[in-house]
Amino acid sequence: MELFRIKKDIPFMRHALVFNIISFVTFALAVFFLATRGLNLSVEFTGGTLVEVNYEQAADLEKVRGALAQAGYSDFAVQNFGSSRDVLIRLPLKSGSAEEASGEQGMARQGEQVMAALEAGAPGANLRRVEFVGPQVGKELAENGALALMVVIVGIMIYLAFRFEWRFSVSAIVANLHDVVIILGFFAFFQWEFSLSVLAAVLAVLGYSVNESVVVFDRVRETFKKVRGMSTPQVLDHAITRTISRTVITHGSTQIMVLSMLIFGGETLYYFSLALTIGICFGIYSSVLVASPLVMWLGVSREQFVKPPKAKDPNVTEDGACV
Amino acid sequence: MNRYPLWKYITVAVALLIGFIYTLPNFFGEAPAVQVSSNRATLKVDAASLPRIEAILQEAQVAPDGIFVEANGIKVRLKDTDTQLKAKDALEKALNPDPANPDYVVALNLLTASPKWLTDMGALPMYLGLDLRGGVHFLLQVDMPGALQKRLDSLGADLRTLLRDKNVRHAGINRDGDRIHISFRDAQTRDKARAVIAAELAEVNLDEQGAGDNLRLVASLKPEALVKLREYAIKQNINTLHNRINELGVAEPVIAQQGADRIVVQLPGVQDTAKAKDILGRTATLEIRMVDDTPGALEGALAGRVPFGTELYTERGGSPLLVKKQVVLTGERLTDAQPGFDSQTREPAVHLTLDSAGARIFRDVTRDNVGKRMAILLIEKGKGEVVTAPVIRTEIGGGRVQISGRMTTSEANDVALLLRAGSLAAPMDIVEERTIGPSLGAENIKKGFNSTLWGFVAIAVFMIIYYQVFGLISAIALAANLLFLVALLSMLQATLTLPGIAAIALTLGMAIDANVLINERIREELRNGMPPQAAITAGYDRAFDTILDSNITTLIAGLALLIFGSGPVRGFAVVHCLGILTSIFSAVVVSRAMVNLVYGRQKKLTRVFIGQVWKPESK
C-alpha cells in the first residue's frame, strides 16, 4: 500500500501568500480571544479548592448548588465531570484572609466543609478527590510554567541556530510559536480549562513539531547542494513533497495514540489530549505551510549553502564559486 | 553487509532480557500484607523480632505467605484480605496490650506478589503515585519568618540577662526588624559589652553605630546561624511529623523536604483527611512541674484519694508518680534537647537548653527545691505522659540543664527526641492538598492502561498493513521500547502518576516516528532503483541524523519541564525524557538487529517486504 502517489512536486509555494494570510488571520483571532476572553486557568494556577464528588444516582446540580449556597459559599462553580453522577465543585480563594496564616489553614479545611455542606443539603455524596492550592503555590506554578516555556523556546532556538543558518531557525520558531498561540487561542475561545498538564502537552508538542520543520529544512539544504538550476520556490516544493508522506504518517501515528487517550483516558486526560490534537494538526500545517514560505520571504538562496571560494573547504572545487 | 557483529546481537538480547526481568514484577500484582514497625525510637523491629511475630501468627492460626524484614519494619504477606485483617487484629492485640499507648505501628499494606527470586534481584513493580493508588498529599510551608522572630525574641532576652549578669549597664535593648539595638551612654561600656557578648554568644554579629552619648551596638544573627536555624526548624518539624504520622498507622508515609522551607507529606491509602490534618497540626506541649513527694500522699492517691492540686501519673518505668498541677515551665521555653554524656561521670544524659526567661525561672525553682524531684511531662490530646522525673541536685543557672542518671544511651536519645518532638520548631501552613479516593485511583490506572493499549494496537495494525514485514519489525521495536521504559521506571522506582502514563502513551506515539522515517527512506531508495541490501543500509544511515534531530528537540522540551515543572508535570517529564532515550535505542538498534536477522544473511536478496513501492511511470 502506498498512500502518497505523487508524480510531480506539488507547487505549495505558488499559494504561499494564501497560506500566510490564513495563518495570520488564525493567529490574530487567537491573540484576540486570548486578550478578550483570557485563559480559563485551573485551580493549580489561580489557587483555590476543587472538590470532586460522586453520587449513586445522577446528581442534582441545583440541589448541590443550593446546599453550598446554604453553607455560605458565594463564588463557586458546580458542574458535571465526565458522567452525570460525578460532580466537580470549584471554590475560589477566600480573599482578604488568604494572606493570614490562619486563613490558609482555614482554606485547607474547605474540603471537609464542603462535604459537610453537601451532607446537609444534597446527601449521598462520595468524596473522590480534593485539590487545594494556596495562593503562593499557585503563583509559583504559573511563574515556573512561563519560565519553562521560555527555556524551551530559547533552547530550541539555540539548537536550530547551531544546526542551520538563522533564516531557518527564525522561521521554525515563528512557525511553532504560531502553533502555541493558536492552541492557547482555542483554549481561550472555548474556555477549556488550562491546567498544568495542558501546559505540559503544549511544551511537548512544541518540541515535537519543531523537528518537522527540521526535516523539511534538511531536505531543502540537501536539494540546494545537490541539484542545480532550481529556483528557490521549486527547491522548497521539492523538499516538502519528498517529506510529506513521512510527515503525515508520523503525525498520524502520534495522533492515533492521542486519539486513544482522548477516548479512553477519561476526563483527567481529556484536555491534555485535546491540546495535543490541536498541536499535532497545526504542527503539520505550520511546519510545511508557514515555516517554508517564511524561509522564502526571508530570502534563502543557493549561494548561502555553497561555500565561497576562499573557504579552505576541500570539497569546494575551483569553479564551484557561484551560479 | 547488513550483519551485526555478534556482540551487538548479544547486547540487544541482554538488554531485552534485563528489560523483561525488571518489567515482570508489574504483572504479578499486589498481595495484602501487614506491616509492623516501631512507634518508639528505642524499640527496633528487626530480625530479632521475627520469632515473636511468627509465634503470634501461629497462635492466631494465620499462615503467612511470606515474612520480610526490611529497614523500616517487618512485612507479612498474606493470601487474602480476610486473613490480612485477622493477622492485623492478632498482631495489634499481642504487640500493643495497651491500645492507648502503642509500642508498635501495625498497618495494612500491599506487597508485590512476585516470586522471591525476583524480589531478591531488586526487581520491584513501579512505584505508583497517589493519583493511582489513592491517598492524601500535603505541601506544608514552614513559617521561617515566624521561627526567626521567635529566635530573635529569645536572643533579646538572652542579651538582657547576659549584660545584667556581667554588670554591664546599658540604656535599653530594642528589637528593630531583624536586628537588636542595644544603647549605651559611653564608649567604654560599649566596648565592655561587646567583649562580653562576643565571648558568650558566638552566633551574634555586632556592629557599632551612633555617636556622642547615644552609642549603639547592633546585634544580628550571623548568616551561618540563620542557615542553622532554618535547617534546624525543618529537621525538627519533619521529625515531629514523623512521630505524629506513625500514630496514623500509615504503611509507607513520605515525609520529605522540598525546596528551602517546604515539607511534602504523602500518606498513601489514607482517606480521612480531617483526622490526618488534625494530627499534623496538633501542638503537643511540654510542661515541667514539681513532684509531690509528701510522705503518704502517693499511697493515699493510689488508694483513690488524690490530694487537691495534684495529679497521678505513671512514670515511663512503670512506677506511679504524684505531680503537682501548677506548671513551672512550658515547652516554649525549651530551645533544644540533645542526647549526650555527663562531662564527669560519662553517664548518658540529655542536655536541655532554655531561653533566658526560662533559665531564670529554672534557676529560682531549682534553688528552692534542691533534693526534690521535678517531672517533665508531654501533654498531647489533653493526656499527659511523664517523660522523665529527675532529682534536683543543685541550683541550676544559665539555662543549660542536664538530665542524667539511670539512663541508657538509647533511652537518652529517646527522651531527647520526645522533648524535641513536643513542639514544632516553627508553625506550618498547608499550602497544597490533594486527596484521591481509592476508586478514582484504580479507575485512573484502568483508563491510562486502556488508552496506551488501544493506541499501541492501532499503531501496530497500521504499521503492519502499511509496511508489512518492516511494519511488524517496527511494531516489535515499539513493544521493546515499552518494555525498556517500564523496566527503567521499575528499576529507578520513579513515581508513576497518571500524567506519567499519558507520557508513556505519548512517547510511544512519537517513538514510531523514527521507524516511519527509516521505512520511508528505505522505500525511497528502492524507488530510486537501489538494490534491497543497499537500500536498507542507506535507509538506516540517512534516517539516523533526522532521528537524532527530532529527539533532541523533544528532549529540550522534556528537560525544561523536568527542571521547572512540579507535581503532575514532573511525573510527565520524567517518563517523557526516559522514553525519548529508550526510543532511540529500540527504534534504531533493536529494529536494525531484527532486520539484519531477517534479511541480512541473504546474499541475493531480490525483494523486501516493505509494502508497495510505487514508482511514477514517467520516471
Image (cartoon, coloured by chain):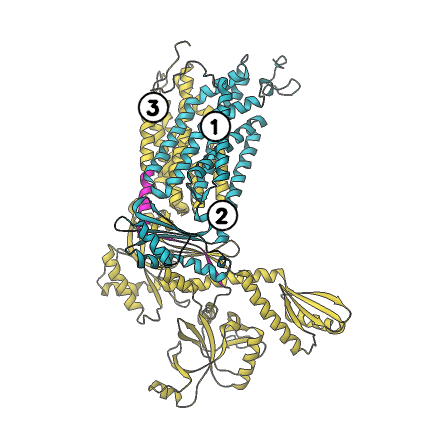
Query: Is residue B5 shown to the viewer in this render?
Result: no
Callout 3: SS:
helix
Closer-to-camera residue (A53/B350): A53
- The image position of residue A86, as x and y in percent, is 31, 48
- The image position of residue A163, as x and y in percent, is 55, 29
| Residue B91 lies in quadrant | bottom left
Give the magenta part as a residue range. B426-452
Callout 1: SS:
helix
- Kindly identify the residue that appears in the image at 30 percent across and 71 percent down: B97
Nearer the observer: mark 3 or 1; the answer is 1
Q: Is residue B458 left or right of residue B315?
A: left
Closer-to-camera residue (B419/A117): A117
Q: Is residue B570 left or right of residue B146?
A: left
- Kindly identify the residue that appears in the image at 74 percent across and 70 percent down: B214
Q: Which amino acid does label 1 sit on?
A: Ser
Decide which of tag 2 and tag 1 comes sooner along the chain. Answer: 2
The chain letter for the residue carrying disc 2 is A
- The image position of residue B245, as x and y in percent, is 39, 62
Shade of chain B as shown in the rendered figure? yellow
Same chain? Circles 2 and 1 = yes
In the image, the chain rendered in cyan is A
The circle on residue A141 is: 2
Same chain? Circles 3 and 1 = no
| Residue B379 lies in quadrant | bottom left
Circle 1 sits on which residue?
A: A286
Circle 3 sits on which residue?
A: B466
